[in-house]
Image: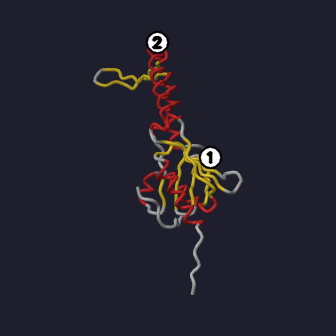
Amino acid sequence: MNAASGIPKKAIAELAQEVNTRGIELALNEDNYLIAPKSVFNYGLHILVFLFACALMIYLTVKFDWSVQYFGLGQWLGYKIRLGLPLFGIFPLIALVWVVRSIYDELYILTDEYALKIMGRCSLTGKTIRLNYVNMRGVNIEKNLYQRLFDVGDLVVESDVTTAGSQIRMKGISNPRFYKDLLQKKMAELIAPTTPQLA
């Protein structure tokens, strides 16, 4: 994976809008920033809940046959065609929406000058948080026992400005150590004092 290079030329709002529509494809076509990807292993519990909801739907549908509503779709070769809609299918549908929203609702972008968190990509309202590297106070990795098994974790970026939106939490990203080292390198480059040149 190549680190971001160059100074981004797009405004924050314009960048956020374009990322929302093109997603990962945008990062592959540009050289001035990269996207910190989320790991599917971070959502093991979400996937288990979805599978449980599917199993529950099957069990309840078999036990209560009245729960399947049939709709006629006409005839074909003398046979009536009907579509069965299981009412208990609402359970896996809700679980699926929860899984998709958890994975895709937030996006994390790193450039040469700042880190950007885009929220609400799958919601009615959106929000962005931007932290410049020169204002960053620290970068920490938080992992639970499950995340340690798959090299997944939350990357917490803190700012020296104590206001709302002064922290970015990148949830469940793959290889968080790589992004921590990258951010610390950027911070060191921007705050390192320059040595005056003698005439």
On the rendered image, what quadrant is the N terminus found in? bottom left
Residue displayed at 48% across by 13% down: 64
- Residues tagged 2 and 1 counted as in contact (Cβ below 8 A): no
Q: Is residue 184 above or below residue 125?
A: below
Amino acid at the residue labelled 2: Lys
Q: Quadrant of residue 81?
A: top left
Instruction: Quickly name the residue at label 2.
Output: 63
Query: Residue 138 versus residue 70: which sits nearer the camera?
Result: 138
Label 2 to label 1, Cα distance in Å?
41 Å
Does residue 198 appear anywhere in the picture?
yes
Q: Residue 90, percent across and down?
A: 52, 26
Amino acid at the residue labelled 1: Thr
Residue projecting furthest to the front = 198
Does residue 170 appear anywhere in the picture?
no
**Left or right: 37 as drawn, with respect to 134:** left
Circle 1 sits in a helix, a strand or a loop, which is it?
Answer: loop
Residue displayed at 66% across by 51% down: 165
Instruction: Quickly name the residue at label 1.
Output: 125
Q: Residue 39, percent across and down?
A: 46, 42
Residue projecting furthest to the bottom = 199
